[in-house]
Image (cartoon, helix red, strand yellow):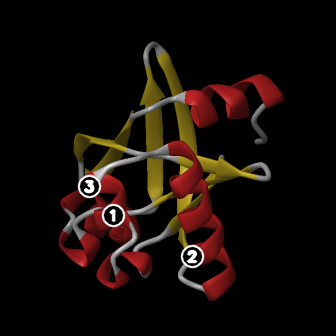
Amino acid sequence: MTLSPDQFDKIAQAREVVIETRKGDRASGTTIWVVVDEGTVFVRSVRGKDGHWYRRAVAEPRVALTIGDDRFQFLAMPASDPVSIERTSQALRRKYRGRSLEMMLMPETLSTTLRLDPV
């Protein structure tokens, strides 16, 4: 499945989204930041590999993003290659400001970059 340009735009414009991850039959939602760069959706864990949602997404990669009443389903794929990390970091810099941004750019968070592929 692909997202429409309007859906990509809605995700790109959202300041925060809720990512739904699973552990077995239990679903859990966490508010996170999301960026879109050239039609690709990226997320990163501000808590690095200690982030609960990140660990669940890596273990069970079917995730969903919720923005208001809209829910988009994705497959979370590791994107820890240098190009994806830089694309995500640049997109975060364009979209966000402040201390939380600095935390998202710390070396220990970079390897937690995930690409979300629509399903």
Q: Nearer the viewer, residue 79 or 97?
A: 97
Q: Provide residue 67's location: percent of width, then percent of height.
A: 46, 24
Task: Tell me which amino acid carries mark 1.
Answer: Glu
Task: Tell me: 60 left or right of 35.
Answer: left
Q: Nearer the viewer, residue 59 or 50?
A: 50
Report if the CB atoms under discs 3 and 2 are less than 8 Å apart: no
Q: Residue furthest front?
A: 98
Which mark identifies residue 85? Answer: 2
Please tell me in which quadrant of the rendered image residue 2 appears: top right
Query: What's the distance in space between the residues labelled 1 and 2, CA to CA?
Result: 15 Å
Residue 87, compared with residue 66, is above or below; it is below
Q: Is residue 79 visible?
A: yes
Secondary-structure class at tag 3 = helix
Q: Provide residue 60's location: percent of width, then percent of height.
A: 38, 63
Mark 2: few, some, or many residues within 10 Å (few <14, many ≥20)? many
Residue 28, compared with residue 78, is above or below; it is above
Check disc 1 and report the residue beneath it: 102
Query: What's the distance in space between the residues labelled 3 and 1, CA to CA?
Result: 5 Å
Image quarter where the N terminus lies is top right
Task: Tell me which amino acid carries mark 3.
Answer: Arg
Q: Residue at x 44, y 32 (%)?
A: 15
Task: Tell me which amino acid carries mark 2.
Answer: Ile
Check disc 3 and report the residue beneath it: 99
Mark 1: few, some, or many residues within 10 Å (few <14, many ≥20)? few
Q: Residue at x 77, y 49 (%)?
A: 39
Report if the CB atoms under discs 3 and 1 are less than 8 Å apart: yes
